[in-house]
Image (cartoon, helix red, strand yellow):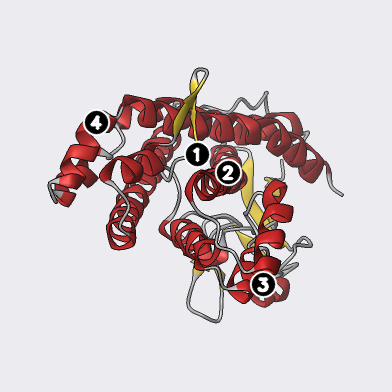
Amino acid sequence: MTQQERRLNLALRRLRPDIRRAFEQAISDAAISIDRRLLAELIEAGRVTEAVELLRVDQSLFSPLRDAVRDAYRAGGLLVEDIAPRGMGGVFRFDGNHAGALAWVQQYSASLVQGITAEGIETARRVIAEGIEEGLSSRVIARSLTGKRVGRRNVGGFLGLTAQQADSIIGGRAKLASGNPALMREYLKLKLRDARFDKRVAKAAREGKPITGRDLDAISEAHRAKALTYRGNVIARHESANAIAAGQDEAYRQIAERPDVEKVTVRWQHNLSEHPRIEHQMMDGTVIEQGETFDFPDGVRMQYPHDVSAPPEHTIGCRCVAIYRVRLKRG
């Protein structure tokens, strides 16, 4: 493992919890701020569009998340300070106020928040529609969206989850309430269920009895809480890797601007992952000059691993890293 990789891994472990907590706090604050009574009244009156808009998260609540992403970006740049090559004239200091750095942080943070908000709106639509179809009361639907207050935090709501996660939880609830042993056993295969209820579910499946009422609500609420924790961890891993990689690349761009530097090269290094991408494995060891691109068979071009201009299938869960080399001009 190179010095770059060791420092990168340490930075990722340090920054991920900050990003996860910032996301979870934003969602908790948003849920607490929602007028649940008004939400239930809008759902009861069939004013679904207004109900969904009521769930739109106030952008200011994401300020801590934007700050955490900015800190990760800056950390990526500061990593380069410690490993800047010897022989350069003078000391290198990463400029976080450089025009390129400021632009990246502003644009990426805005895009991240907009994406989370858009997913939340789609999730709300699905939850309300499914709740009405199931015949749930407007009060129960509102509570399922916002969760409940526990101390200073809010837990167990659909707010903050992706539409895919919401579909899984809604489908799981239907399986538990069906009384069909086969369907109920399928619930036990769901990745993000709360396993503390497994014995209760298994017993009901054996007896062919549906799970209803408070038991069903408790299981669904725990499922939602675990899914939100998972979402926070995914966001933390993804956004920290993206921001640090971008900050590191910006730092080397600043190095490349120095008069004593001839060029900077970037080597793609593939690291083991649970589901390795064949294209990334094939790219392993490829070297380009900074500013050029790694060109993939599907037409995607990336300047470095975790380049945010690439589609999610090339970045989410990726553990590849960029290894930079600086070539100084000969005196």
Residue 242 at x, y percent in the picture: 56, 47
Q: Which kind of residue does numbered mark 2 sit on?
A: Ala
Which comes before the other along the chain, label 2 or label 1?
1
Residue 189 at x, y percent in the picture: 67, 66
Lateral position of residue 123 relative to residue 65, left or right: left
Which comes before the other along the chain, label 4 or label 2?
4
Residue 315 at x, y percent in the picture: 56, 59
Q: Which residue is mark 2?
A: 222
Spatial distance from mark 4 to mark 2, Cα to Cα? 23 Å
Say if residue 302 shows up in the picture. Answer: no
Which comes before the other along the chain, label 4 or label 3?
4
Q: Which residue is mark 4?
A: 37
Q: Quadrant of residue 142?
A: top left
Q: Which kind of residue does numbered mark 1 sit on?
A: Gly
Decide: few, some or many residues near mark 4? Use Cα within 10 Å; few <14, some 14-19, many ≥20: few
**Mark 4–mark 3 CB contact (< 8 Å):** no
Looking at this view, name the residue that lies furthest to the top: 152
The tag on residue 277 is 3
Which comes before the other along the chain, label 1 or label 3?
1
Q: Residue at x 71, y 60 (%)?
A: 203
Q: Which residue is mark 1?
A: 156
**Mark 2–mark 1 CB contact (< 8 Å):** yes
Spatial distance from mark 4 to mark 1, Cα to Cα? 18 Å
Q: Residue at x 20, y 46 (%)?
A: 43
Secondary structure, mark 1, is loop
